Image (cartoon, rainbow, N blue to C red):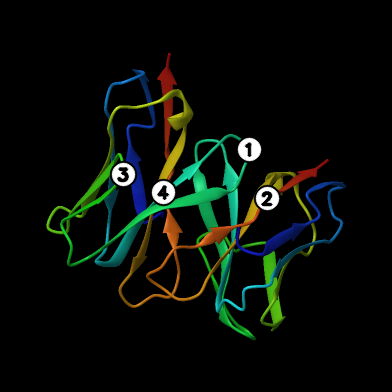
Amino acid sequence: DAGITQSPRHKVTETGTPVTLRCHQTENHRYMYWYRQDPGHGLRLIHYSYGVKDTDKGEVSDGYSVSRSKTEDFLLTLESATSSQTSVYFCAISESMGIEAFFGQGTRLTVV
Amino acid sequence: SQQGEEDPQALSIQEGENATMNCSYKTSINNLQWYRQNSGRGLVHLILIRSNEREKHSGRLRVTLDTSKKSSSLLITASRAADTASYFCATDFQGAQKLVFGQGTRLTINP
């Protein structure tokens, strides 16, 4: 299995609080992605990174920010969590475009 | 809006039958991939087809790609109970460095 770890695996937080999810890889892959998965919507891309300090927005980036200060870590931050951000969040990595991506086990976030 | 859209959203068949899922996309792609997700787990890569390929096989999987119709299909032959999962197509399209997924097809194989 590809070395990709998401933390935490589960989190419950209150509306208005900041939350940071971490994706850590040991594969030295260039590309890292954050997705959210909700019933009826499949996987939607939040942000992605194509190198250290190189990030860009996906389809549903409002309310989220990311940082990638080193190859192995990609952080997703909810500046002020809302109930609409209750979801399962997946991180994925790939060595380059045009080859398979490897997924983490997901983080289940509940905003109450 | 999402790049890939799967059809049908849900499919239920008997064990041993073949299952076909379709994916349509909107803009020119470089590659199209199919992934499987077992309940509550991360996605697992199944197969990748490049824009200059028309068909690809891997075990019981057959993928076709029609770039003129901007569509792909995934065929699983001789289905098994263990094939029960959600299946997603994903595309990386020209001029972008991102991988975009569709809504998925939920496949149920009945014993």
Amino acid type at circle 4 is Gly
Q: Amino acid at mark 2?
A: Gly
Q: Amino acid at mark 1?
A: Gly
Residue type, label 3: Gly
**Residue A44 in picture, x, y percent from top left:** 52, 53
- Label 1 to label 2, Cα distance in Å? 8 Å
Position of residue B9 relative to residue B24, above or below, is: above
Q: Tell me which residue sits at (30%, 74%) in the image.
A: B94
Reading the image, the residue beneath label 3 is B59
Frontmost of labels 4 and 1 is 1
Residue at 31%, 44% in the rendered image: B59
State the SS at label 2.
Answer: loop
Q: Earlier in the sequence, mark 3 or mark 4?
A: 3
Q: Residues within 10 Å of mark 3 (few under 14, many from 20)?
A: few
Percent from the top left, x then y, of residue A64?
68, 64
Mark 4 and mark 2 on one chain = no
Q: Which mark is residue B102?
A: 4
Q: Nearer the viewer, mark 3 or mark 4?
A: 3
The C terminus of chain B - image quarter = top left
For disc 1, the marked residue is B40
